[in-house]
Image (cartoon, rainbow, N blue to C red):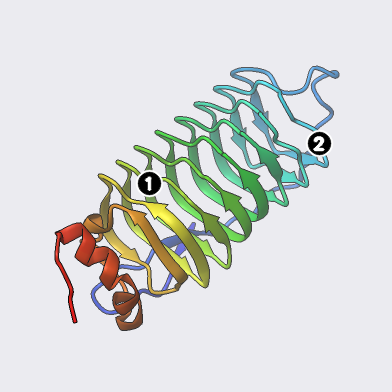
Amino acid sequence: MARRAVGGTGVKGARRPELRLPALERFEGGGGSGLEPDGDYDGLEFRGADLAGQDGAGARFMDCALAECALDGTRLSRARVLDSVLTGVRGVGTDLAEATLRDVEVTDARLGGTQAHGAVLERVLVRGGKIDFLNLRSARLKDVVFEGCVLVEPDFGGARLERVEFVDCALKGADLTGAVLTDVDLRGAAPLEIARGADRLAGAVISTAQLLDLAPVLAGEMGLRVEG
């Protein structure tokens, strides 16, 4: 189940996930071996688990909760995270390349250098926390909401964003090179800083104040000289 966020005039709002997790069993580490490639994790709670450096590539997480887990260098490429909640996760260099996140809530994450290029995010809510240097190149985002969080130099190069909202969110140094935007609501981003790819903002909605702030960047993209 999902509910649609309220969008402004002329822009379709994102559908947010509505999660109701079942009673969960505590993850015991699979007999001490931790995550396994192509593993199947269903209805589990990972609380305070140190998953740093572990290999869960291709694994499936269904109806799971990850709370206060360490994800430094954790390999989750091509993993599927479905109907799950991540709270207070932290780590540098987490590998989510080509992963699928569907009906997922991420709350108060502290992540840096997360590799999510080629990933698919659908009905995902990222609330609170700070994510530095998020690599979403060539990713597909549909019905994604960034709320009350700080994104530092996120890379959306070549990505497709459809019904994506930024609500009370700081967006610093974003790269939109080659991105395709459809019904993307940037009005709640403060500050809104586009380092590259401002010419790709077609399909987004911004406020009048943001337009004035972006005027020098847009003029530069157009090769427009402003004098006097």
Is residue 119 toward the left or the right of residue 209 in the image? Answer: right
Is residue 129 toward the left or the right of residue 223 in the image? Answer: right
> Which amino acid type is shown beneath numbered disc 1?
Phe
Asked which quadrant contains residue 211, the reply is bottom left
Q: Nearer the viewer, residue 64 or 170?
A: 170
Q: Position of residue 191 (x, y in %)?
A: 47, 70
What is the CA distance from the residue labelled 1 to the residue labelled 2? 30 Å
At x 31%, y 73%, the residue is 206
Circles 1 and 2: CB atoms closer than 8 Å? no
Disc 2 secondary structure class = loop
At x 61%, y 25%, the residue is 75
Q: Which mark is residue 156?
A: 1
Q: Position of residue 15 (x, y in %)?
A: 42, 61
Q: Nearer the viewer, residue 28 or 209?
A: 209
Q: Position of residue 48 (x, y in %)?
A: 83, 42
> Which amino acid type is shown beneath numbered disc 2?
Ala
Q: Is residue 8 visible?
A: no
Residue under pointer 2:
49
Asked which quadrant contains residue 215, the reply is bottom left
Sequence-wise first label, 1 or 2: 2
Label 2 crowd (10 A; few <14 / some 14-19 / many >=20): some
Label 1 crowd (10 A; few <14 / some 14-19 / many >=20): many
Is residue 89 toward the left or the right of residue 145 in the image? Answer: right
